[in-house]
């Protein structure tokens, strides 16, 4: 299969349908294809996609099917485990269990990070440069139609101001505490990004080697992460161990709250548009009356 990337490059990729290892919902769109078929597949780019400005955006992949094979039934034994890099089947189960626990820990850490960022949004900043706001709005609206941009313009500006304000506060905290990102830390993050894109390792590596702006963006991510970790260290926190079920409950509640916030923001934008529409005819009418009076 060939997937055409933003830079116009292509890479042969082997997929096992039904595993969803590449992008969510990607596999099921290829069910029923035959050798030499060409198919356009649409998918939402994930949070860990290298080009951060394209995260959560819809992408189209022009796929050419080079070959189709029937997968063989796999026997789950020690040899299978060794093929995956484990010592034996018992060791593989331990590694998988650790990976699952790490995923829960990472999700809870992200939740903690988001809570800190929300608290920082409450701080007051004297002035936010308009040119920074405009640049951030461009990033937020990338890939949208002109009509959608106009609909979300006010909402985007509000989000942009919050992001910039938080960024300025974090940067000030980082400078005060002399936080820096070493080359080793940056390369470790690149390797982490590579591991998160199975089957696309070479593509991700090539991307960061040839795009200095993407590498700089990744350095910024590591810098922010180090600052937030220091904030957590300095803050008074109550740590406690939670079970898998409790972790799932916490994450689900957070997801529901985020969805509720999005719906509320959407309603506010729609209400504001209705108010503008109601106000506009009165303004025109007043203008006409003024014109008549001035003639007299």
Image: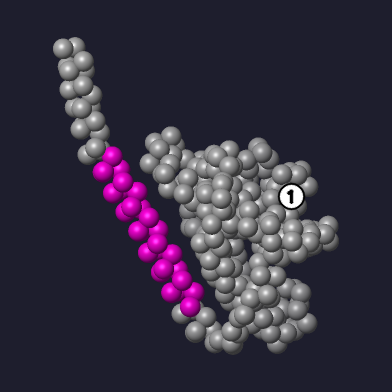
Q: Which colour scheme is used?
A: one colour
Tell me the residue at 74%/58% (across/down).
Answer: 175
The answer, for residue 68, to whether it is visible in the render is no
Tell me the residue at 25%/33% (across/down).
Answer: 280
Residue sticking out furthest to the top: 295
Q: Position of residue 182 (x, y in %)?
A: 82, 59
- Does 187 sit left or right of 35 as displayed? right
Nearer-the-camera pick, 7 or 116: 116
Q: Is residue 80 above or below residue 41?
A: below
- Does 271 sit left or right of 154 as displayed? left
Q: Position of residue 243 (x, y in %)?
A: 54, 87
Q: Where is residue 231 in the image (x, y as percent from the top left)?
A: 66, 70
Q: In this view, does 80 lie above or below 161?
A: below
Q: Is residue 239 above or below residue 149?
A: below
- Does 200 sit left or right of 245 as displayed? right
Nearer-the-camera pick, 227 or 77: 227
Taking the magenta stretch, the answer to whether it contains residue 173 is no
Tell me the residue at 31%/46% (across/down).
Answer: 272
Q: Magenta region, mostly helix, strand or loop?
A: helix
User: Which class describes the residues within 10 Å of circle 1: few (<14), some (14-19), or many (20+)?
Assistant: many
Q: Is residue 159 above or below residue 286?
A: below
Nearer-the-camera pick, 263 or 278: 278
Tell me the residue at 48%/78% (across/down).
Answer: 250
The span picked out in magenta is: 250-276
Taking the magenta stretch, the answer to whether it contains residue 275 is yes
* Quarter placement of the C terminus: top left
Nearer-the-camera pick, 279 or 239: 279
Disc 1 is placed on an element classified as: helix
Residue picked out by circle 1: 215
Q: Where is residue 287 in the image (x, y as percent from the top left)?
A: 23, 24
């Amino acid at each position: 299969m060939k997937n055409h990337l933003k830079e116009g490059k292509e890479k042969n990729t082997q997929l096992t349908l039904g595993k969803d290892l590449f992008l969510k919902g990607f596999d099921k769109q290829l069910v029923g294809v035959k050798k030499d078929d060409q198919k356009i597949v649409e998918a939402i780019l994930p949070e860990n996609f290298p080009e951060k400005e394209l995260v959560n955006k819809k992408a189209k992949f022009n796929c050419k099917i080079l070959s189709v094979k029937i997968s063989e039934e796999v026997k789950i034994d020690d040899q299978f485990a060794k093929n995956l890099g484990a010592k034996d089947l018992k060791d593989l189960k331990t590694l998988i269990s650790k990976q699952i626990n790490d995923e829960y820990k990472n999700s809870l850490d992200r939740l903690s990070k988001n809570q800190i960022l929300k608290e920082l949004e409450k701080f007051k900043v004297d002035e936010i440069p308009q040119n920074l706001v405009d640049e951030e709005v461009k990033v937020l609206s990338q890939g949208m139609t002109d009509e959608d941009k106009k609909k979300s313009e006010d909402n985007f500006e509000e989000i942009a101001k919050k992001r910039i304000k938080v960024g300025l506060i974090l940067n000030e905290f980082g400078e005060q505490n002399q936080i820096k990102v070493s080359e080793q830390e940056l390369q470790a993050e690149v390797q982490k990004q590579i591991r998160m894109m199975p089957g696309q390792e070479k593509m991700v590596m090539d991307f960061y080697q040839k795009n200095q702006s993407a590498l700089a963006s990744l350095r910024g991510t590591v810098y922010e992460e180090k600052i937030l970790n220091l904030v957590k260290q300095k803050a008074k926190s109550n740590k406690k161990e939670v079970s898998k079920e409790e972790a799932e409950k916490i994450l689900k509640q957070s997801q529901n709250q985020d969805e509720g916030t999005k719906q509320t923001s959407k309603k506010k934008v729609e209400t504001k548009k209705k108010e503008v529409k109601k106000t506009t005819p009165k303004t025109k009418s007043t203008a006409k009356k003024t014109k008549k009076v001035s003639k007299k």
